[in-house]
Image (cartoon, rainbow, N blue to C red):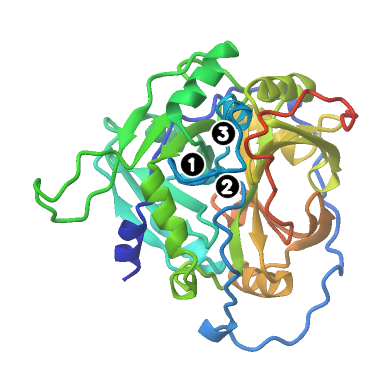
Amino acid sequence: MMRCLWLLLSLPCVACRPSGGGQDASAASTEAYQPPPLTPAFPERPLPPLGVAEIKVAPATPDAGMIPDAGAARPEATAADEARRRDSLLGGERGLDHVGIALADLDAARKAFVDLGFSNPQDGVLPNGIKNVNFYFSDGTYLELLTFYDRHKAPDIARFVERYQAGPMFAVLAVASAEDTAAFLRARGFSVGAPRPGRIDPAGAGNKEKQPRPMWHTLMFERPALPGEPLFFIAYDRAVRSELFRKLEDESARRAFAHANTVEGLRAIWIAVKDLEAARSAYLNAGLEAGEAFALPQLSARGVELGAGQGSVLLLSPQEGRGPVAEFLARRGEGILGLSLRVARLPRARTVVERGAGIKVMAYSGFFGPSLLLTPDRAAGAWLEFTTGPARRSAAGRGPSSDSTDNWRP
């Protein structure tokens, strides 16, 4: 049933080039890093056994941060508003869409994530040499675990997996128009390729039943452009996108996307960078919105937030050359090291995750508020943060934020 629903909602599964890496022994520390101790931030209360009745489904908010259907009446929008919307990276779309974690043992990772409370895994075999398992969330975002079955068709995935075994490889930002985003980036000096069409057809459908119209277009940088090389873009067909959110207005449809750990969607990606100031400038030049500086003592790091529609990009660099971020940079070079997931009930998430991982998780007050942190050895090479932080409200149509230094204190 879920497989049919997945096809019905037409969510794509795509992969991109691996993060730019490289060894930097100078970033490593000879002193072992000791994380802060577990804090009693969220005292446990007796909870009933897990079950369907315990899964609470939040109402869908399809209009938040997303442009309306193409051609829909927008009497409040002026010509100037539309021009500003087009002259932006996202064009008013929702931004952070999905994250890909590449790994060698897909079956083991699938089991590990199910044990952590991620429900309704969707298995797939793609003609481009990739096998994957997707976990879809009720806000329309999703998490993709993937590996290769044909290294000649998926050489980038193969190289990444053979070199690093497992870890976050890429993140995808949803944009309103691949053509407008390409023009925006080229005007800022970036080299991007032509948009690539893609679609999903029901299994067994004959040629007469297949529609030639693409369901989405993807857009990638042609040359290394951003520290870590973690991003590419997807522009969904407006009719497909509208149908997805129309279906998510129905609680029974949203229930199919509910998870035992109460995860509702992606909140942020974490990117390890060597030079925080230079990385921030590069991502701002690409059109992300300026955000706040912060410290993350749990990873012995300092960072800065950048807005990516309803999600965020957190750039992290090590403090004093030690800690998990420094170790990641020494081992892999710049790239995605973790992600934040928004949950509905943090005590429930803690109970489920600790039960599945077999360990206590770190509880702390993070950038998004009360949070839990799971180490990469329990989550296919990714730091996983579970947080109650709300979806970020992007200034849709306003265009990229100016490069203000008001909140920037490295």
Sort mark 2 into few (<14), some (14-19) or many (20+) by Cα contacts within 10 Å.
many
Sort mark 1 into few (<14), some (14-19) or many (20+) by Cα contacts within 10 Å.
some
**Label 1 vs label 3, nearer the camera:** 3
| Element carrying mark 1 | loop
The residue shown at (59%, 82%) is 54
Q: Kindly identify which residue carries mark 2.
A: 381
Q: Do the residues labelled 1 and 3 touch (CB within 8 Å)?
A: no
Q: In which quarter of the image is residue 289?
A: top right
Q: Which of marks 1 and 3 is nearer the N terminus?
A: 3
Q: Kindly identify which residue carries mark 3.
A: 90
Q: Which of marks 1 and 2 is nearer the N terminus?
A: 1
The quadrant of the rendering that contains the C terminus is top right
Place of residue 67 in the rendered image (x, y in percent of width and height, measured from the top left): 54, 43
Look at the picture and state if 55 lies above or below 410: below
* Relative to 108, 396 lies left or right: right
Instruction: Give how far apart the Cα atoms at labels 1 and 3 are.
Output: 32 Å
Q: Do the residues labelled 1 and 2 touch (CB within 8 Å)?
A: yes
Residue 211 or residue 150, whichever sits in front: 211
* Relative to 219, 320 lies left or right: right
Toward the front, the furthest residue is 75
Place of residue 53 in the rendered image (x, y in percent of width and height, measured from the top left): 55, 86
